[in-house]
């Protein structure tokens, strides 16, 4: 009986210590199932002797997985391109390394002195200016834009380009720094490359014949993928397509009727593009730049070419128009007219009433005179 009681107390104590001191992830049932001494050393987390002696209970760390052959070189280069955000070990990075590269491109052409003069002074400076303007036009971080600009020192070779990208790009500085890049904290670095633009127009620098000054600049813009930080989720292809679309949109205001019955009269999307990038055009690779019509119809040509004479009005059309205007003016002031008519009618009625009363008074006076002074015929003037 004493031996059974001691065995029962032993099991109760073991269950209590197991619930209190076992490492996380181990149950009482699994602890009791390994009461034998055949527990492998790599799976042992403790023993009763260790518990009684006060030794801490800890889980044995799992062995490190073996490296995958051939994955160190390719993935490590991708990790270095992504700013250290990924690892070459697939076990450490189960979603795979992210290849940081340009996903979309489009072409631009500008003849604005704002850009051509700065390009002549500094290629890095014009890259920052263009990226800042494109950021406001597309509402994406400026670090997502890269440029292939013609090399000023090799204007004869069309494939000699200056590739400029931001020092705040996600591949160099990480996603958070890239997301909040602005013109005040961003610079662009450029390097010479051989790059052929997929364009239908020549990309050679157009210079003035007298001053050798750059008058037109054609370049290619690359768009990096979205960082996914703080709303920066627009795909690179969508950024390029939207920019080309607004670059070729109308500048004139458009009137739009909404479903609620209200109208909006706002300027076209092209106003914003040309306000930020004057004298500029954008097109997808391989597509020509659309020439914009900046003329406004002001009336007939002073030279008479193409102008049509005004149509001749039929006889009597002027009288009808005059009567129509008078009629419209009458109906426009109908309340005033009715008030004036009432005043005239009241005045006429009062005048007639006064005339009636005057005649009555005159008749009364005449009757009274005739009644109080009767006529007496004179004496017989003839005599007997």
Image (cartoon, rainbow, N blue to C red):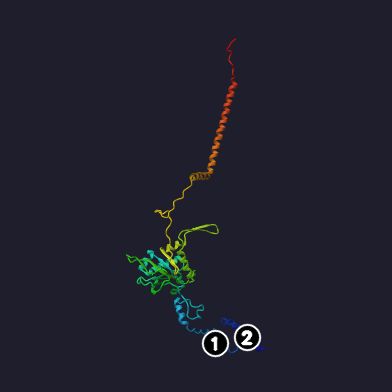
Q: Residue 349's x, y, as percent?
A: 56, 35
For label 1, the SS is helix
Front residue of this view, candidates 105 and 228: 105
Q: Earlier in the sequence, mark 1 or mark 2?
A: 2
Front residue of this view, candidates 4 and 166: 166
Residue occupying the point 60% across, 84% down: 30
Crowd band around label 1 with a 10 angstrom C-alpha radius: few (<14), some (14–19), many (20+): few
**Dot label at residue 100:** none
Alpha-carbon distance for marks 1 and 2?
Answer: 25 Å
Task: Give the residue pinned by disc 2.
Answer: 11
Image quarter where the N terminus lies is bottom right
Residue occupying the point 45% across, 62% down: 270
Q: Residue 375's x, y, as percent?
A: 59, 18
Task: Give the residue pinned by disc 1.
Answer: 42
Asked if residue 20 lies left or right of residue 274, the reply is right
The reply to whether the C-beta atoms of the residues labelled 1 and 2 are less than 8 Å apart is: no
Q: Is residue 149 visible?
A: yes
Asked if residue 151 lies left or right of residue 100, the reply is left
Q: Residue 199's x, y, as percent?
A: 42, 70
Say which quarter of the image contains residue 376: top right
Q: Residue at the top extreme?
A: 384
For label 2, the SS is helix
Say which quarter of the image contains residue 3: bottom right
Front residue of this view, candidates 80 and 35: 80
Crowd band around label 2 with a 10 angstrom C-alpha radius: few (<14), some (14–19), many (20+): few
Front residue of this view, candidates 354 and 247: 247
Residue occupying the point 46% across, 66% down: 244
Image quarter where the C terminus lies is top right
Q: Residue 197's x, y, as percent?
A: 41, 71
Q: Is residue 138 visible?
A: no
Q: Is residue 184 above or below residue 31?
A: above
């Amino acid at each position: 009986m004493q031996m059974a009681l001691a065995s029962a107390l032993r099991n109760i104590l073991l269950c209590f210590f197991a619930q209190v001191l076992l490492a996380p992830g181990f149950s009482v049932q699994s602890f009791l199932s390994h009461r034998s001494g055949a527990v492998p050393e790599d799976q042992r987390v403790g023993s009763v002797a260790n518990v009684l002696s006060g030794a801490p209970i800890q889980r044995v760390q799992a062995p490190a997985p073996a490296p995958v052959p051939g994955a160190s070189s390719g993935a490590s280069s991708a990790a270095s391109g992504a700013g250290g955000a990924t690892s070459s070990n697939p076990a450490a990075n189960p979603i795979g390394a992210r290849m940081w590269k340009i996903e979309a491109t489009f072409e631009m052409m500008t003849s604005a002195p704002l850009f051509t003069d700065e390009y002549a002074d500094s290629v890095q400076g014009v890259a920052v200016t263009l990226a800042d303007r494109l950021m406001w036009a597309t509402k994406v971080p400026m670090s997502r834009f890269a440029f292939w600009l013609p090399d000023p020192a090799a204007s004869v070779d069309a494939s000699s380009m200056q590739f400029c990208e931001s020092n705040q790009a996600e591949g160099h500085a990480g996603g958070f720094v890239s997301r909040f890049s602005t013109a005040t904290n961003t610079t662009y670095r450029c390097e010479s490359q051989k790059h052929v633009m997929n364009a239908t127009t020549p990309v050679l620098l157009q210079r003035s014949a007298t001053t050798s000054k750059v008058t037109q600049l054609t370049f290619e813009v690359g768009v990096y993928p979205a960082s996914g930080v703080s709303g920066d989720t627009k795909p690179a292809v969508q950024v390029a397509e939207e920019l080309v679309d607004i670059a070729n949109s109308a500048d004139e205001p458009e009137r739009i009727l909404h479903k609620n019955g209200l109208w909006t009269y706002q300027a076209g999307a092209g106003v914003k593009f040309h306000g930020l990038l004057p004298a500029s055009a954008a097109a997808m690779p391989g597509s020509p730049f659309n020439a914009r019509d900046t003329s406004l119809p002001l009336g007939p040509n002073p030279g008479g070419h193409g102008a049509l004479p005004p149509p001749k009005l039929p006889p009597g059309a002027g009288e009808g128009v005059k009567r129509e205007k008078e009629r419209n003016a009458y109906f426009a002031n109908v309340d005033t007219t009715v008030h004036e008519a009432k005043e005239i009618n009241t005045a006429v009625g009062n005048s007639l009433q006064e005339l009636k009363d005057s005649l009555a008074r005159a008749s009364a006076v005449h009757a009274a005179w005739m009644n109080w002074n009767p006529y007496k015929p004179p004496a017989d003037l003839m005599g007997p």
